[in-house]
Amino acid sequence: MDLGGKQIIVTGGVKGLGRAMVEKLVSRGAVVTVFDIDVAGFDSLKQELPDVQCFACDVTNYEQVSGAVEDYFASRGAPDVLINNAGILYSEPLIRITGTGLQLHDADMWERVLRTNLTSVFYMTTSVVGKMIARRTKGVVVNIGSVAAAGNPGASAYSAAKAGVHALTQAWARELGPMGIRVIAVAPGYMDTDSAHAATSETALRETIKRVPLRRLGKTEEVADAVVAVIENDFFNGKVFELDGGLTI
């Protein structure tokens, strides 16, 4: 797929990995729209990239997703590409032994992490793919997964959500491929982002870096490059592109 002039939706595109993707896609000539709850961040995004359209949308809320996609469709038609990037990092062990007894994983946070990282992917994809099929668009869905899908100790909810994202990628690739819609996942390893530093102790990050053959964290622009690469390659489908510096070798 040649990105020039292609209509692309990026969820969670105001900051972090999403922002890097938006910048890269715009530089390649794509017409980018951001779905995000960070309305306060829209101004800074549009100051840098004035042609980017922004929709205030909580992707964990089906009614908001459906409404935003309908509004997008009315103004721009069916998108060519959907990038499901919105998500949150969260670490908490299943059981923690404390001085006052056992502390169990927070049930509300389990629900929140699953809604934000997995359910949102289902909501966005069903809504957008319906428009692609209605317009017979041969499109692409890119899901941002994680190497944590293999099961990171201390990250039950996040690992479960990302494993679900990888499974949906494979299921949808089989379902939608005959309609000309490719579904792909890009799975970053440990990245040098504000959210990663906030969710993981610096000690843990230093220990992780020791296990990465390249001895460093990944860069947001490297994830953006990977996303562009899998979109542009028309025969890449149903696979998880792991970008982790060799951590999972």
Image (spheres, rainbow, N blue to C red):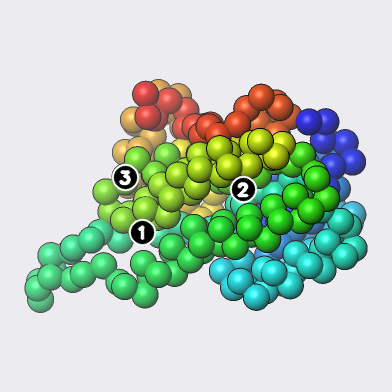
Q: Label for residue 151?
A: 3
* Secondary structure under the numbered disc 1 in the rendered image: helix
Q: Residue at x 67, y 74 (%)?
A: 64
Q: Residue at x 31, y 38 (%)?
A: 207
Estimate the x, y position of residue 166 in percent, counting from the top left.
Answer: 47, 43
Estimate the x, y position of residue 90 in percent, counting from the top left.
Answer: 40, 59
**Left or right side of 99 for 138:** right
* Residue 124 in sight in this render: yes
Spatial CA distance of label 1 from label 2 is: 20 Å
Q: Quadrant of the N terminus?
A: top right
Estimate the x, y position of residue 184 in percent, counting from the top left.
Answer: 59, 38
**Left or right side of 157 for 128:** right
| Residue type, label 2 | Leu
* Secondary structure under the numbered disc 2 in the rendered image: helix
* Residue 182 in sight in this render: no
| Residue type, label 1 | Ala
Residue density around tag 2, few if under 14, some if 14–19, many if 20 or more, within 10 Å: many
Tell me the mark number nearer the camera, choosing from 2 and 3: 3
Q: Write down the quadrant of residue 226 in the picture.
A: top right
Q: Residue at x 58, y 42 (%)?
A: 175
The residue where tag 2 is placed is 17
Q: Quadrant of the C terminus?
A: top left
Spatial CA distance of label 3 from label 1 is: 10 Å
| Residue type, label 3 | Gly
Do the residues bearing badges 3 and 1 touch, measured as CB atoms within 8 Å?
Answer: no
* Secondary structure under the numbered disc 3 in the rendered image: loop
Q: Earlier in the sequence, mark 1 or mark 2?
A: 2
Estimate the x, y position of residue 211 in percent, counting from the top left.
Answer: 34, 30
The residue where tag 1 is placed is 157
When the figure is inspected, residue 96 is found, relative to residue 132, above or below; the finding is below
Spatial CA distance of label 2 from label 3 is: 22 Å
